[in-house]
Amino acid sequence: MLTRSLLTLLAMCWAQAMAAELEGDCPKVVVSADPDYPPLHWYDGKELRGPSIELATRILADLKIPYEVRYVGPWKRVLANASVGKIDLVATLKIQPERER
């Protein structure tokens, strides 16, 4: 389930990146996650780490999509940044009815 959700999000990001490239922009996908959710991901005081971050960045790199892993603070701030488009991909975001809307 996690991999399918991540791949769906990455496909959407890839489509947006390709559309922007055609317009002459040079976008990058901003990736973030809950900084306190080990063993999937965590903030070590310098950067976000963990297997979900590694998986997302490896897929983006394989697709040759520029990316940046960004720590923005606590989970609520991650979601707030994602809701206004400052974060493009939230690693291991769980599917919930509210988020599907």
Image: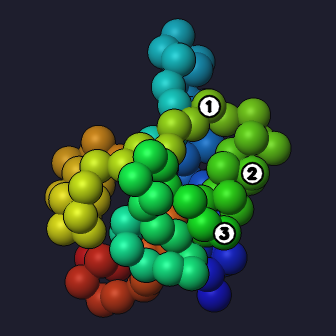
Identify residue type, mark 3: Pro
| Cα distance between the residues tagged 3 and 1 | 19 Å
Q: How is the image coloured?
A: rainbow
> Which of the two marks, 3 or 1, is nearer to us in this view?
3
Question: Can residue 8 be seen at all in this image of the molecule?
Answer: no
Residue at x 49%, y 15% (from the top left corner): 25
In the rendered image, residue 22, in percent from the top left (x then y), is placed at 58, 18
- Along the polypeptide, which appears first: circle 3 or circle 1? 3
Residue at x 43%, y 78% (from the top left corner): 37
Q: Which residue is mark 2?
A: 58
Question: For mark 1, does the 10 Å Cα neighbourhood hold few (<14), some (14 to 19), or many (20 or more) residues?
Answer: some
Q: Which residue is most to the front?
A: 45
Q: How many marks?
A: 3
The quadrant the C terminus occupies is bottom left
**Helix, strand or loop status at disc 3:** helix
| Cα distance between the residues tagged 3 and 2 | 10 Å
Which label was assigned to residue 51?
3
**Residue 61 as seen in the image, left or right of residue 74:** right
| Cα distance between the residues tagged 2 and 1 | 11 Å
Q: Which residue is mark 1?
A: 66
**Helix, strand or loop status at disc 1:** loop
